[in-house]
Image (tube, rainbow, N blue to C red):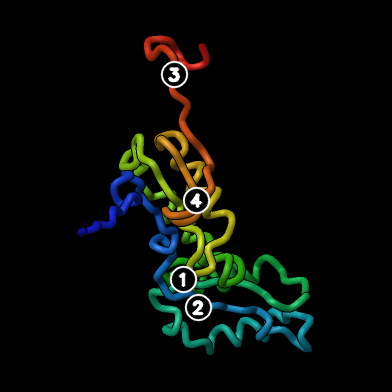
Amino acid sequence: MESTFLNKVAKSGIITLNLEDYYPKEEVEVFDLKEYLFMGLILKEKDFREALKALNIESYTGKIVALTCSADAVIPMWAYMLVASLLQPVAKEIIFGTEAFARETMLLRNIEQIDATTYNDARLVIKGCGELPIGESAYVAITQKLRAVAKSIMYGEPCSTVPVYKKKARADPSLPEGN
């Protein structure tokens, strides 16, 4: 007796979306103003300007720059503006915040670029576990992006999902929604 295994997941028409596919691939370089503080507390304008003149900005060429200050210090706004002005001609983009925040910002932009119409009436599983640090904001963004078009949205793996959203069938399609 010959037995064949049926892949019910493959036959179900479920589409798996892996948010890791939208994770930014660009290199992120951190510019930390902490390195320019006098005694780890104060930013001296004259010293800061001199240090920036000596900075090799080529190391930031084509990269996403996460502009931050990891020290607990009060940094004048002009200091961030000065760094942005210096790096803008060579950097791909400058994002205020930590490296993690810069990556999250880019991930959310990539999710925003998804053509939602591709998933009209689709049964979707948003993959849960992975190798990359995908935060809650990305899962919220993908849900908001696709809820209006998807037939259903689930979280997890196709073999073990948590239902998130299911489009309700309308009793009479000729009536406006809500009736």
Q: Of residues 140 and 166, which is closer to you in this image?
A: 166
Q: Earlier in the sequence, mark 2 or mark 1?
A: 2
- Say if 3 sits above or below 97 in the image: above
C-beta proximity under 8 Å, tags 2 and 1: yes
**Residue 74 location in percent, x, y?**
77, 71
Q: CA distance from mark 3 to mark 4?
A: 25 Å
Q: Which amino acid type corresponds to the residue marked 2 in the rendered image?
A: Glu
Q: Of residues 114 and 179, which is closer to you in this image?
A: 179
Tell me which residue sits at (44%, 23%) in the image: 169
Q: Quadrant of the N terminus?
A: bottom left
Q: Earlier in the sequence, mark 1 or mark 4?
A: 1
Q: Which residue is mark 2?
A: 29
Q: Which amino acid type corresponds to the residue marked 3 in the rendered image?
A: Arg
Quadrant in the rendering for residue 39: bottom right
Q: CA distance from mark 4 to mark 2?
A: 37 Å
**Residue 48 location in percent, x, y?**
65, 82
Q: CA distance from mark 2 to mark 1?
A: 6 Å
Q: Which residue is mark 4?
A: 161
C-beta proximity under 8 Å, tags 4 and 2: no
Q: Which residue is mark 3?
A: 170
Camera-near label (3 vs 4) is 4
C-beta proximity under 8 Å, tags 3 and 4: no
Tell me which residue sits at (33%, 38%) in the image: 117
Q: Earlier in the sequence, mark 4 or mark 2?
A: 2
- Where disc 2 sits, the SS reads strand
Q: Which residue is mark 1?
A: 64
Camera-near label (1 vs 3) is 3
**Residue 9 location in percent, x, y?**
35, 51
- Where disc 3 sits, the SS reads loop
Tell me which residue sits at (63%, 72%) in the image: 68
Q: Which amino acid type corresponds to the residue marked 4 in the rendered image?
A: Thr
